[in-house]
């Protein structure tokens, strides 16, 4: 299976940024652990702080990957354009969040992208990404 993990704005600062919410591990470290868990998968990773670049990546990978694990970060709550990009492609997208957004500020309770994703995983720390991969694996087996 070929899976692309996409991280949105400020997630390049994981391990440094608001550690009480997002933990002290960098995504690069976690990504190395994930790759060891899935040695038979092509597990790719892309991060951008720029909305249009995330959209371009979503378009591109529709031809190269079986699914996307997407943490759109703050764009989750604002981006109609990312939602439309997800709706425009045929491969499944799982929305993930490190924190439980529903326990946080009210503006984080609204996701503009959830309706175009297969499902949502939130609140399990970095393990949310692994759970997203598990969800994609199950979908792939069932198809
Ligand atoms: C986040 C939650 C968002 O509300 C926030 O803007 C982020 C990270 C999470 O993974 O918990 O940057 O997507």
Image (cartoon, helix red, strand yellow):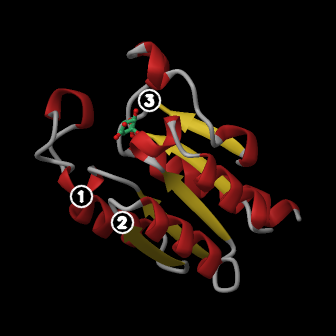
Q: How far apart are labels 1 and 2 at the CA level? A: 7 Å
Q: Is residue 1 visible?
A: no
Q: Is residue 22 above or below residue 66?
A: above
Q: Earlier in the sequence, mark 1 or mark 3?
A: 1
Q: Quick check: which quadrant has ligand 1? A: top left
User: Which of the image's four quarters has the N terminus?
Assistant: bottom right
Is disc 1 in contact with disc 3, using a CB cutoff of under 8 Å? Answer: no
Pointer 2: residues within 10 angstroms few (<14), some, or many (20+)?
some
- Name the residue tied to disc 2: 47
Question: x, y percentage for residue 90?
Answer: 80, 68
The picture quadrant where one finds residue 87 is bottom right
- Name the residue tied to disc 3: 123
Q: How far apart are labels 2 and 3 at the CA level? A: 20 Å
Q: Earlier in the sequence, mark 2 or mark 3?
A: 2
Is disc 1 in contact with disc 2, using a CB cutoff of under 8 Å? Answer: yes
Looking at the rendered structure, the secondary structure element under dot 3 is loop
Question: x, y percentage for residue 25?
Answer: 18, 49
Pointer 3: residues within 10 angstroms few (<14), some, or many (20+)?
some
- Mark 3 lies within 8 Å of ligand 1 (Cβ measured): yes
Front tag of 2 and 3? 2
Q: Is residue 21 above or below residue 80?
A: above
- Mark 2 lies within 8 Å of ligand 1 (Cβ measured): no
Question: Residue at left 54%, top 74%?
Answer: 56
- Horizontal side of 13 relative to 101 (left or right) equals left
Question: x, y percentage for residue 15?
Answer: 15, 47
- Name the residue tied to disc 1: 12
User: Which of the image's four quarters has the C terminus?
Assistant: bottom right
Looking at the rendered structure, the secondary structure element under dot 2 is strand
Q: Is residue 98 above or below residue 10?
A: above
């Amino acid at each position: 299976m070929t899976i692309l993990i996409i991280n949105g704005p400020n997630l390049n600062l994981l391990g440094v940024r608001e550690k009480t919410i997002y933990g002290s591990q960098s995504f690069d470290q976690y990504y190395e652990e994930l790759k060891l868990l899935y040695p038979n998968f092509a597990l790719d990773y892309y991060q951008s702080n720029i909305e249009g670049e995330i959209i371009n990546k979503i378009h591109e990978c529709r031809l190269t990957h079986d699914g996307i694990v997407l943490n759109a970060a703050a764009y989750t709550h604002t981006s109609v354009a990312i939602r439309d990009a997800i709706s425009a492609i045929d491969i499944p997208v799982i929305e993930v969040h490190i924190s439980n957004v529903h326990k946080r500020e009210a503006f984080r309770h609204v996701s503009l992208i959830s309706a175009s994703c297969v499902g949502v995983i939130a609140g399990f720390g970095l393990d949310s990404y692994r759970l997203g991969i598990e969800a994609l694996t199950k979908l792939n087996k069932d198809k």
